[in-house]
Amino acid sequence: MRIRSLGVIDDAVVELSPGFTAVTGETGAGKTMVVTSLGLLLGGRADPALVRIGAGKAVVEGRIAPAAGASAVVRAEEAGAELDDGALLISRTVSAEGRSRAHLGGRSVPVGLLAELADELVAVHGQTDQQGLLKLSRQRQALDRYAGGAVSGPLAAYTEAYKRLRAVAVELDEIVTRARERAQEADLLRYGLDEIAAVEPRAGEDTELAEEAERLGHAEALAAAATAAHAALAGNPEDPEGIDASTLVAGAHRALEAVRAHDPALAALTDRIGEIGILLADVAGELAGYASDLDADPLRLAAVEERRAALTQLTRKYGEDIGAVLAWGEEGAARLTELDGDDERIGELTAERDALGAELGALAEELTKARTEAAERFAAAVTAELASLAMPHARVSFDIRQAEDPEGIEAGGRTVAYGPSGVDEVELLLAPHPGAPPRPIAKGASGGELSRVMLAVEVVFAGTDPVPTYLFDEVDAGVGGKAAVEIGRRLAKLARTAQVVVVTHLPQVAAFADRQLLVEKTNDGSVTRSGVKVLEGEDRVRELSRMLAGQEDSEAARAHAEELLATARAEG
């Protein structure tokens, strides 16, 4: 990894060994920034506070070489990433303003994609993960992960049935608790539908009646205008000497008709005048018919206004116009059918709820059985690991129990509480020595014991659900002496099949590493490119001496450091 402007690190390169790499250095030197950097590369949260003071952005670049054909490689290639000689190049940029960008194989990608790949590529564990292991939910998740398909299969079916049961319960509760409101809604709908049915409106009727009312209200003026227009076009029988448009046009047509044969242009004009005459005659006839058909009956006008008033009552309540009123009626009828079917729906939902409850109970029993069987194997494996971590007499077990709940589901002959993951409460118990009763690790484990329990759990996972790289951030906290040596020995064993990176203060752990990196600050308090270096030979002895006694040149510390290295090499 190359790290720039992150925390105390100005610009540094971290080269990790394929086996076991130990990262050491003084407190505050920036060792944890190695963990933070890898977390960013794996889609961790971008905190602008991480950006070095005075820098505009922090940049972390990494090269990860996953196994050929790994699903992480397939997923990356689907996102458009290109491999560099079989390796994935990842970069993450965090600006001082909080903006974050991610690149994978030369392509800009969502940060969430990096998080997807992380699950398969790297397992990161620190002191916060130890605290997480104290939570019952995390303990159940660990057991389920170890159990694999024996639990994941029925758990998936249980989860689907649980979601459906919750949805049915919510709908049923809504129908039952809102029965009065729904009855009131139904009454209002019936009233409205009855009111519309009594009027029997037609689509567009309001527009038609408005036009008719306008016409009937001005019938006399319309008739007079139509009669006058007819007289102007076709003449007035009471005034035979009067001049009208039809007579004038007919005279013009006769004058031209006599000479049209002598000029085609004049013939065309003659034809157009003839068309005008025909059009005048048609319009005059329609005006005569309009005037004679116009109904000035005041009774009809009153009937129209009465009908319009009835329609207005509907549009005032149910829509802007009759079309909207009719649409409201259709929707209201459908909703009323739904509301009137409440009793039947309640019966259907109750039956479905009971059936889902029975199904959920059967699946929960299957889950409990699978977890119980896996818990015995998991506890035995973790106990065996603890024996190699200087806890030879410790025993780990699981308490799998269910809580009584009258509102729960039937499982195992009892009515018990249930949730999205089943009915089981899973708790990890530790008996640190013979004769000690098993107690929850949250109450009965010291900091050092908790560190070793978590390491043992992770080692067990490494045998059943391995990842290529393990990163431990001070997982040895609270441990010393022989226990520290055993942790170093066990990490070295894990490193035979995976890459292991450990940030540690313990020389007993660091001595077992294939490569030891020292993180040190310059005089100005920053870590530069030369501030992360591989320790070999005398330099490594000096650093282990410092870690042992706080004095690099102490002869006793040097002798102890050389002894630690010799022991580690002999076992390697």
Image (cartoon, rainbow, N blue to C red):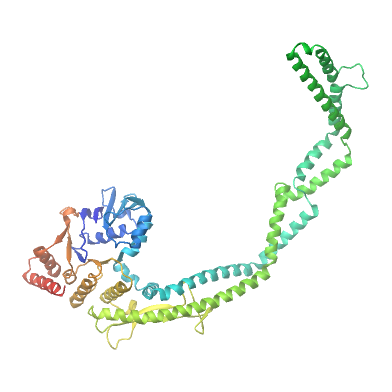
* Residue 44 appears in the picture as rendered: no
Q: Position of residue 293 (x, y in %)?
A: 88, 35
Q: Height in image: 187 above or below 200?
A: below
The location of residue 6, given as percent across then percent down, is 26, 54
Q: Quadrant of residue 85?
A: bottom left
Q: Horizontally, is 483 left or right of 92 in the view? A: left
The image shows a total of numbered marks equal to 0
* Residue drawn at (37%, 80%) of the image: 375
| Residue 206, image x, y percentages | 76, 44
Residue 461, image x and y in percent?
Answer: 32, 73
- For the point 73% across and 48% down, the residue is 322
Which quadrant of the structure image shows residue 463? bottom left
Quadrant in which the C terminus is drawn: bottom left
Who is closer to the viewer here, 483 or 458? 458
Residue at 12% over, 69% down? 549
From this view, report whether residue 453 is shown above or below residue 201.
below
